[in-house]
Amino acid sequence: MTNRKIRAGVIGFGLGGKIFHAAVLAAVDGVELGGIVQRKGDEAAKAHPGVPIYRSVEAMLEDKSLELVAVATPNDSHIPLTKQLLSAGRNVVVDKPFALASAEVAEVIQLARKQKLLLSAYQNRRWDGDFLTVKKLLASGEIGNLVSFESCYDRWRPQPRLNVWRENGGPGGGILYDLGSHLVDQALSIFGLPSHITAHIRIERPLAVVDDCFEILLQYQDHTATLRGRNLAAIQRPRFLLHGTRGAFLKWGLDPQEDALKSGAKFSDKGFGEEPASAWGTLTTDADGNIVTRPVQTLAGDYRGYYANVRDAILGVEPLAVPAEDAWRTIRLLELARESSQQGRTIECDWTTAP
């Protein structure tokens, strides 16, 4: 890696811009947080004293030294902003979900290729400790040949938050695109493209106006992947459950990084991203006819890994881990999930429109 620092800007300073972009960028070696667009308020200035704060994207783009810009705004604004940034010669990271339609993703991919610029989706949960542990476990072969993969992201939010854009019925809201994009991206990054999909997407909470529950079954040649999420989950389901020909792996609880960052913790804090032993998953295997269960230490998660990879990709020393083509596949699968749910049947996955 060269000694040149990548100067980066962030558009938006809600939860995503504050916790998942500005805070992460500021903590990555070789990256300098060089600007934040917050149209109203002074939260960004207080959180990052000395960093220029802009009231418009146009004002930030006057700083030609910014090579990378992260888009952390409401979902329906992602594509217009991405087009504006690419046309202005900036490398772009777009928060998930990347767009509302796969055709929109394909369009900006073509623009990024024309401009010879980096374009990536912020799929930070590939750097969750529990997900890294699952990948390591699958690679080890300890559970044998995988036959069933279950991934679940539940919340307890019984009252719809009708005053926020994710739940007020506007474009881009709902749990499928919010949490489902994480689970779909993780599954695709491990297993690739499924052949068929069966999905049930619905509204469960009284007064809710956007989907707040989903179940997606992906069919592969020798196993299935089931992805679930709901907002009415006073008792949460396992985060991961894997069954194989030699055993099974069970993991409860979410990666601790998000809650830690919300509480003011820093990546440099001792033990950041680590789970206590009480939160580790368990591996159950058949040892010569004896069922044996043992804990599996959760690897430490570190969201800085995402932006460290983007930095290295811009510098030309490492391939991009989450290219925009991955975002297209994720959005396309979410579209197919809606189609399956609306039709009430299993459908074949059509990938022929890939950019």
Image (spheres, helix red, strand yellow):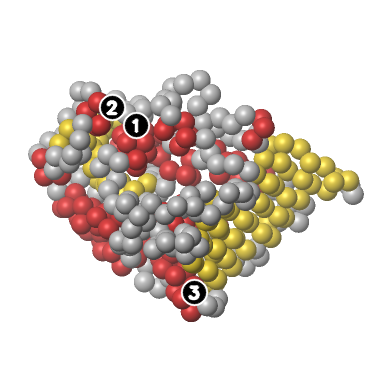
Amino acid under label 1?
Ala
The picture places residue 68, in percent across and down from the top left corner, at 24, 40
Residue matched to label 3: 340
Mark 1 nearby-residue class (10 Å; few <14, some 14–19, many ≥20): some
Please give the residue where the numbered disc 1 appears in the rendered image: 23
Residue sitting at 17 percent across and 52 percent down?
84
Q: Amino acid at mark 3?
A: Ser
Residue drawn at (40%, 73%) of the image: 352
Which of 83 and 164 lies nearest the eye of the viewer? 164
Drawn side of residue 308 relative to residue 273, left or right: left
Residue occupying the far top of the picture = 270
Q: Position of residue 99 (x, y in %)?
A: 32, 59
What number is the disc on residue 47?
2
**Residue at 66% from the left image edge and 30% from the top image edge:** 277
Residue nearest the observer in this picture, 243 or 18:
18
In the image, farthest residue toward the right:
289
Mark 3 and mark 1: span between their CA atoms?
Answer: 38 Å
| Residue 164 shows up from this direction | yes
Of the 4 image quadrants, the one containing the C terminus is bottom left
Pointer 3 or 2: first along the chain: 2
Compared with residue 141, is residue 309 higher up or lower down, i.e. above or below? above
